[in-house]
């Protein structure tokens, strides 16, 4: 792990917006990151609505 980002907001929507901003501004040189995938998760309606479980990534993204 290179970094762990923790954000706080008044509610889930605000926290997700802050996390999207942090990940979008992330700069890591020399290695491949999964920042684009994290942004896809943060944009997912089921994730935004707190409607997910342990099979979320497989169901939503086919991985």
Image: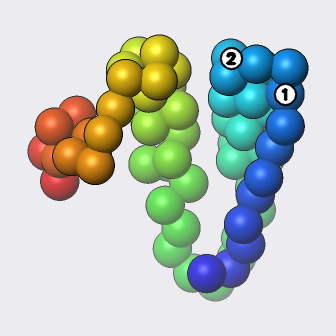
Residue that carries the numbered disc 1 in the rendered image: 9
Q: Is mark 2 on a helix, strand or loop?
A: helix
Residue 4, given in percent of the width and then of the height, sits at 72, 66
Q: Which mark is residue 42?
A: none
Decide if residue 53 is in sight here. yes
The residue depicted at 78 percent of the width and 52 percent of the height is 6
Real-space Cα separation, disc 2 to disc 1, in angstroms: 8 Å
Mark 2 vs 1: CB contact within 8 A: yes
Residue 13, given in percent of the width and then of the height, sits at 68, 17
Q: Residue 13 carries which label?
A: 2
Residue in front for this viewpoint, 30 or 50: 50
Decide if residue 44 is in sight here. no
Q: What element carries label 1?
A: loop
Give the left or right position of residue 8, taking residue 44 as reference.
right
The residue depicted at 53 percent of the width and 67 percent of the height is 33
The residue depicted at 51 percent of the width and 73 percent of the height is 32
Residue in front for this viewpoint, 42 or 24: 42
């Amino acid at each position: 792990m290179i970094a762990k980002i923790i954000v706080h907001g008044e509610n889930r929507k605000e926290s997700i917006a802050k996390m999207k901003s942090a990940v979008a501004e992330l700069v890591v040189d020399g290695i491949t990151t999964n920042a684009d995938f994290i942004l896809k998760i943060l944009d997912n309606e089921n994730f935004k609505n707190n409607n997910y479980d342990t099979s979320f990534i497989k169901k939503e993204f086919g991985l």
